[in-house]
Amino acid sequence: LFFCPRGTGKTTCAKIIAKAANCLSPVNGSPCGVCKACLSIEAGTATDVIEMDAASNNGVDNIRELREGVVYTPADLKYRVYIIDEVHMLSISAFNALLKTLEEPPEHVIFILATTELHKIPATVLSRCQRFDFHRVSMDAIVGRLETVCKGESIGAEREALELIARLSQGGMRDSLNMLEYCAGDGGVITVEKAERLLGAASRTLLSAIADAVASRDTAAALSVIEDIYMSSRDIAVFWREWIAFCRDMMIALSTRMAGVRDELLKASAERFTLPGILYLLEIFMSAETDMQRSPANARLYAEMALIRACDATLSSGNDALLARISALEDKLATGNFTAPRKE
């Protein structure tokens, strides 16, 4: 059983295992890649390697058909390999039909199950699998791979643009390659501005600007950013996820006292907040994101409500809001930047 986020190599590794199990000339356990078995699996012509998408073949009849084929010995290869992708999409009756085969599989059969949602796999199935957890690909590794692809395909790209693509892919190599291909579609050099425009991403300058507006309690400036995004027909929910990620980066920067922070815009923005303050803001913004997912048509309204609350802590009466206000006062007193409010 392979478990990991999407786009991190489950199906690719499943095919590699299929090659390794059937390779005619393995090299230290790895497939040679040049024998008849390896080439047929790579080309997708091997009749003994069966890929099944459980998202569209999730009924008990599909599993019964699979069970009927399991009893036959491989036609050309040593092992018959069944790769069931998105296995969590199988119905309960389909899982029950598959269970007996998993309990006593024929010696010539290998099952490779892949999923992105482990919690949906019945315990009876989990207990009969050898589990492998994949991990998100690091940003540096993704950027390095994108640079290799750009060099091999003669694609001009700024490193900052590739870093933006890597950040937006959230650790998924497949997504990063798809975005690179999309940005390179017109044949021109991939700049940061071009990538932001095509991918609908917010610039670090824009994110820093809204952070400064919130830190300054400038509600009008914060709301004007949302207005600009709305009028440009960009997806506010996508921007909101990037804004939360930027706040998360500020939180980490503050909690580590700026250790290893190379982004000067991020550093300058983070220095305007306190750790309790940014934690309080993140709760507001994440609550708004949940509301956006529940009612996408009202994304702008939820974003504006969250920013108004963020710019005026007196609108919230919870303990987190009180701690944020106390922390801000302590910070002003410590720096001597404190002015008593005027009496009207």
Image (spheres, helix red, strand yellow):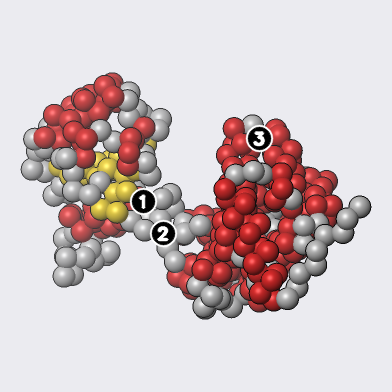
Please tell me how many numbered marks the rendered image carries.
3
Where is 74 relative to 252, above or below? above
Q: Residue furthest right?
A: 344
Q: Earlier in the sequence, mark 3 or mark 1?
A: 1
Residue 342 is left or right of residue 190, and the answer is right
Q: Position of residue 210 (x, y in %)?
A: 74, 59
Disc 3 marks a residue whose amino acid type is Pro
State yes or no: discs 1 and 2 in contact (Cβ < 8 Å).
Answer: yes
Q: Where is mark 3, residue-wise? A: 296
Residue at left offset 73%, top offset 76% = 336
Residue at left offset 38%, top offset 44% = 116
Tell me the SS state at disc 2.
Answer: loop
Residue 143 is left or right of residue 266, and the answer is left
Looking at the rendered image, the disc whose residue lies closer to the viewer, 3 or 1, is 3
Q: Where is mark 1, residue-wise? A: 4
Q: Can the viewer see residue 15 in this picture? A: no
Q: Where is mark 2, residue-wise? A: 136
Residue at left offset 57%, top offset 60% = 276
Disc 2 marks a residue whose amino acid type is Arg
Question: Which is nearer the eye, 313 or 2?
Answer: 313
For label 3, count other residues whose C-alpha is less than 10 Å away and answer few (under 14), some (14-19) or many (20+). some
Q: Position of residue 38 (x, y in %)?
A: 26, 58
For label 1, count other residues whose C-alpha is less than 10 Å away and answer few (under 14), some (14-19) or many (20+). some
Tell me the SS state at disc 1.
Answer: loop
Q: Earlier in the sequence, mark 3 or mark 2?
A: 2
